[in-house]
Amino acid sequence: MAEIRFPATELPEGARKMVSVGGIDVGVFNVGGELFALQNRCPHQWGPVCEGDLLGAMESAGPGRYDYVPDSYRLRCPWHGWEFDIKTGCGWTDIKARVRRFYPRREEDEVVVSTSPGTV
């Protein structure tokens, strides 16, 4: 298991921080006080997915109808627009496409990001 630690003050609410965990580039996000971490590599063409836009999710029940889904966010790769669920790393349009998920947590005044869930 690899992990990295940094001061929680470096990741205020709404921010993202790029780190290296065991030699892997990872984007760590603070969304509404919740921490998420994904590998910064899009499965499409290895683009820097964690540098893309973080968007609120929308659903559609049919043509012309769009509903915002609260507490659901997607990360859009800046290269070709592929989108991934920030919580799971699952692709939005291709369920086989996924971004590797990491496991961030708070420990006192630090954020710890590891390659395994451990104790959360």
Image: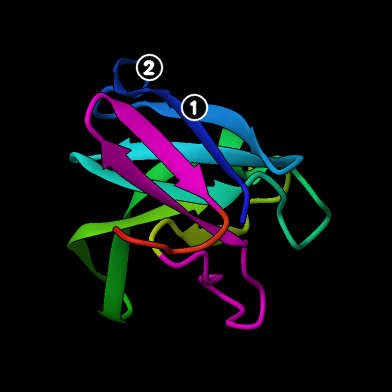
- Residue 109, above or below 115: above
Give the number of the disc on residue 30. none
> Decide: marks 2, 1 in contact (CB < 8 A)?
yes
Q: How is the image coloured?
A: rainbow
Nearer to the camera, 110 or 49: 110
Q: Does 37 sit above or below residue 72?
A: above
Disc 1: which residue: 17
Could you tell me which residue is drawn at 56 percent across and 70 percent down?
A: 91
Magenta stretch, residue numbers: 88-114
Which quadrant of the view contains residue 13? Answer: top left
> Mark 2 = which residue?
10
Camera-side residue of 78 and 62: 78
Within-10-Å neighbours for mark 1: few <14, some 14–19, many 20+: some
Q: Residue at x 29, y 58 (%)?
A: 120
Point 66% across, 44% down: residue: 40
User: Residue 57's x, y, as percent?
Assistant: 32, 59
In screen coordinates, is 38 left or right of 87?
right
90 in magenta: yes
Q: Earlier in the sequence, mark 2 or mark 1?
A: 2
Compared with 21, 5 (above or below) is above
Confirm whether residue 52 shows in the render: no
Q: Amino acid at mark 1?
A: Lys
Whether residue 93 is visible, yes or no, is yes
Q: Quadrant of the N terminus?
A: bottom right
* Circle 1 SS class: strand
On the picture, is 70 further left or further right than 83?
left
Q: Give the residue type that dot 2 points to.
A: Glu
27 on left or right of 60: right
